[in-house]
Amino acid sequence: MIEAHEADAYILDKAYDSDAVVRAAQRQGGEAVIPSKKNRKVVRAFDAHLYKDRKKVEWFINLLKQYRRVATRYEKTARNFLGFVHVASIMILLR
């Protein structure tokens, strides 16, 4: 999936902490922002400030999933689904 997208930083959780993933991110020209697993012998440094943004995105997605039409993907077409994601996002931001 990393090789299909270009980004400045790839922010992933500990489950993706492997040398292969880090190399793939570097080949794409991005920084791998992945905290090291406990059992890693050589602990890699990562940008903790940038990693906090990942949590914000996950929280927002969890708020979106509180809307049944988004969680169960009620809409048949991608256009209609994206439209309702936009409506739900606006409703969340207006709270």
Image (tube, rainbow, N blue to C red):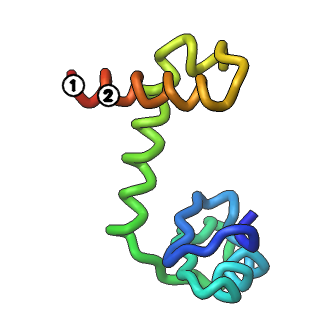
Query: Looking at the image, is 82 positioned above or below residue 70?
Result: below
Tell me which corner region of the image, top left, top right, bottom left or bottom right, holds residue 2.
bottom right
Quadrant where the N terminus sits is bottom right
The quarter of the picture where the C terminus appears is top left
Q: Residue furthest left?
A: 95
Q: Amino acid at mark 1?
A: Leu
Tag 1 secondary structure? loop
Residue placed farthest to the right in the image? 20
Q: At x 37% / y 57%, what residue is drawn?
A: 53
| Residue 24: quarter of image | bottom right
Q: Position of residue 10 (x, y in %)?
A: 56, 69
Type of the residue with mark 2: Ile
Residue under pointer 1 = 94
Q: Position of residue 38 (x, y in %)?
A: 62, 66
The front one of 35 and 28 is 28
Q: Is residue 63 above or below residue 4?
A: above
Q: Image point 55% across, 31% down: which residue? A: 82
CB-based contact (under 8 Å), mark 2 and mark 1: yes
Residue that numbered label 2 is attached to: 90
From the viewer's side, name the closer residue of 9 and 93.
Answer: 93
Q: Position of residue 92 (x, y in %)?
A: 31, 25
